[in-house]
Image: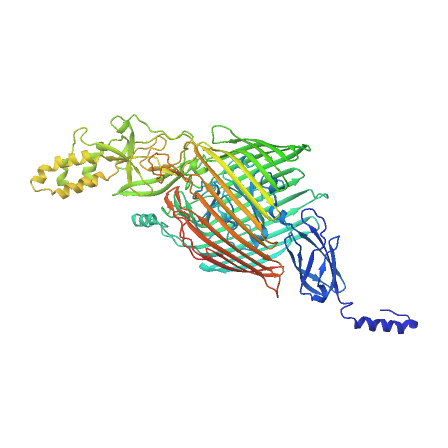
Amino acid sequence: MRCPFVRSALCGVALLFASTVPGAAQDGVLSGTIFDAETSQPLDGVQIEILGATEEQAGGLLSDAQGRFRVGLAPGTYSVVATMLGFAQRRIDGVSLVAGETTDIEIDMTSRAVRQNPLIVSVSRREEKALESVSTIVTVEGEQIEDRVALSPIEHVKALPGVDVSQTGITQANIVTRGFNNVFSGAMLVLTDNRIASVPSLRVNAYNMIPSTNYDVDRVEVLLGPAAALYGPNSANGVLHVITKSPIDDPGTNVSVATGERGIVQFEGRSAFKIGDNAGLKISGSFMQGEDWNYTDPVEVQQAMDNPDVLNIGARNFDAERAGGELRFDWRPWDDGDGEVIFNAGYNNLGSSIELTGQGAGQAVDWAYSFLQGRLTKGRLFAQAFMNRSDAGESFLLRTGQPIVDNSTMMVGQIQHGWEASESQDFIYGVDLQRTEPKTEGTITGRNEDDDMIDEVGGYIHSKTALSPTVDLVGAVRVDYHSRLEDLVFSPRAAVAFRPAEGHNIRVTFNRAFSTPTTNNLFLDLRAGRIPVGAVGYDIRTLGVPESGFTFLDECVGGVQNLCMQSPFAPGQLPANAGVLWDGLVAALVPEALQPALLNPDAGALGTVLRRFNQETLGFDPDAGPSPIDRMKPTISNTFELGYKGLFGDRLLIAADVYSNRLRDFVGPLRVETPSVFFDPATLQSFVLQRLDPLIQGGLVTPEQASEIIGNFAMLPVGTVAPDQAPSSDLLLTYRNFGDVDLWGADLSFQFFATDQLSITGSYAHVSQECFDFNDDGDCGSSNDIALNAPGNKGSIGARYEDKLLGLTLEGRLRFSEAFPMNSGVYVGEVPGYGVADANVSYQLPWAPQATATVTATNVFDNLRREFLGAPEVGRLVMVRLAYAF
């Protein structure tokens, strides 16, 4: 302080006074504004607590009518907690104060009503409230995701209504909504930031290949039921949409390390920062390793014994490992903020993992997945282009040791625009282009390698008409072209939504959706196993259906039903008559001294029967003969749904949906379609005993020797009734479209806020039928039947407690699933029911509030259960994580 001489005495007193008032010149000032996150209106009377400040400094602090508060505090770093009845607590950590300076913060608070009625984008690619949507959407918010240690996104959706999750390893799972699950499944449309996230060409949803970390995810939205009117093909079984954070809106750095049972170690990190006021950059990455649950496949064991010189059969590596990362740049060049340009790239390497396929398990070794994406939004315009790539590395099938080569690419371009014609009429329209290019070097698509590209084009228009303030009418139609299908596919949609009161929505909808044949359905050509027969044998081959379908020539006179066969015992096409091979087989299989007595049978002396290989028992069952297979068609789903969602007293949210679904031309699993040719046991026995009787009477042959000869020939498949399009003796497994499948179901759920800190949730789902007996044998468990591969009844109940002041979150849930039949690829049988309990505790350390310790336990009581055939028994998994936010 400068003082004129004449005022020196007064200045000295002032300086003395300033030095004796504690902190008067050393304090910083914290100034804040609190507002409603939905309305942006200031909130009056919000209780403000500042962790690290004394009661004298910040006790009884409340926001004023303008939502403002102001307090002087000693320099340092604080945590600010805002509490108000009817709103979720908000906590802001890392608020730094500097002496003599003012720090301004803004706190947005979310009401209970908004928490139960969040904004969603998956129905129309534009924001709308969940309670006003004509589709059923369930969400998992980012805060819940960050509070849980998870090795893949599947952990966050296990308890959602209508969602079927079958866990097959520590990071592997198959997910659909409302049934029709499968191994190696792509039935559910999985998106990350509007980008198709499945592995290209194989169209499998490998959730452990999604590069996003838990810190990237803003929320997960799951759309129950069909969604083809907007998303086009392969959305008939629902949509799972992972939406990530913008670096502009969520800057900062998060890092964590987790460890747990089964030797699990996981590192995750995300760093995002703003560039000026309208741009931002994010980089994130993760690494995980651990030991998967063990399982021994008896088929692999047998195949390894039968093929000792073939490498990799049964060579399972239970050490799971993955690493990945993403880079994202956001730019908002327009002053009005109504638009943005986003570039995103990601890479994931699945170092080691065991994945179930329709041909048995596969061992992934350095399987890489990558993508590039560009997006533009401006007003009602949405446009994007992306490319997904796959590189299967050194992966191989465990039942055959055959390498898997997949260097496939998917390229997609999409554009959508909206037009508000009037206050009561709105339109959305768009076009999608997609090219899928499989590249397998003959390992997966075999003979089809040079003719397996798929092009798809789709266009759609949506109309939403407000008939009154409480009634909306929605109509839509979509047309899709697929280069490998015979006809165009039409997907209409109609819905009426009625809002009888604020927070209540009743809707009636009709949706037609479709799923196109996969590249496996169309182009698969892969050896899946072998049945040894002496020095020869039969390969088990999986084959896609060509455009001509499969036909069986019936012009071989002398064969059963005039059918033709191929045999490893003789070249060329032969009548399906075991007797034509008799003399050659006798010369090869019968002792030389007995051969003259058995050669040259009379015509008709030896009968022929057909049998079909049973994938479940590995034996041969009686068969009536083959039936032709038409070219593949899309599976059409027609769904009628009645739904209700209502909010009571801003505390209780109830959702109920009842639906009826008819599927036409459902694509069944891989099954054996080529019968094998056998000697008729009755005529075989009669002939052999008649020819050998003189030798038996003379003591040259014992009855036991004769019985052994009869048994050997009776069990010998001598040929295969092969289709005209694949003339070989291989046992052929392929796909076919079945007839209509009808079912109905219901999804029920609730969320109850007992307090602003304690919420209770519950869900229940029912499907009317778990299996469809297509061969009418009264047994809905054979390989010829169609299974839902999901339980008819399942449910969950959970509770979550949050105290931002303490920095404590407690969560627990119970899940149950009843038993169900399974028929998926080579896996046929019954999956047992189960019940499990999960728990989670997250705690911000009071001496380091930017650090959080979390303990997550799935299957707390270690209830071993197998959720899919061919998968290991899944046990308890406890993980501990320490996270730090900068």
Coordinates of residue 626 in the picture (x, y in percent): 32, 31
Q: Quarter of the image containing the N terminus?
A: bottom right
Coordinates of residue 430 in the picture (x, y in percent): 60, 34
Q: Quarter of the image containing the C terminus?
A: bottom right
Quadrant in the picture for residue 61:
bottom right
Query: Can residue 800 be seen by looking at this rendering?
Result: yes
Coordinates of residue 591 in the picture (x, y in percent): 15, 42
- The color scheme shown is rainbow
Residue toward you, 797 or 93? 797
Q: Is residue 742 left or right of residue 106?
A: left
Residue toward you, 179 or 593? 179
Q: Is residue 99 above or below residue 68?
A: below
Query: Can residue 216 be seen by looking at this rendering?
Result: no
Q: How many marks?
A: 0
Quadrant in the picture for residue 183:
top left
Residue toward you, 140 or 693? 140
Q: Is residue 580 above or below residue 190?
A: above
Residue toward you, 723 or 143? 143
Coordinates of residue 384 in the picture (x, y in percent): 60, 40
Q: Is residue 120 above or below residue 861?
A: above
Residue placed furthest toward the front: 649
Residue placed furthest toward the right: 6
Residue placed furthest toward the left: 698
Q: Is residue 210 above or below residue 54?
A: above
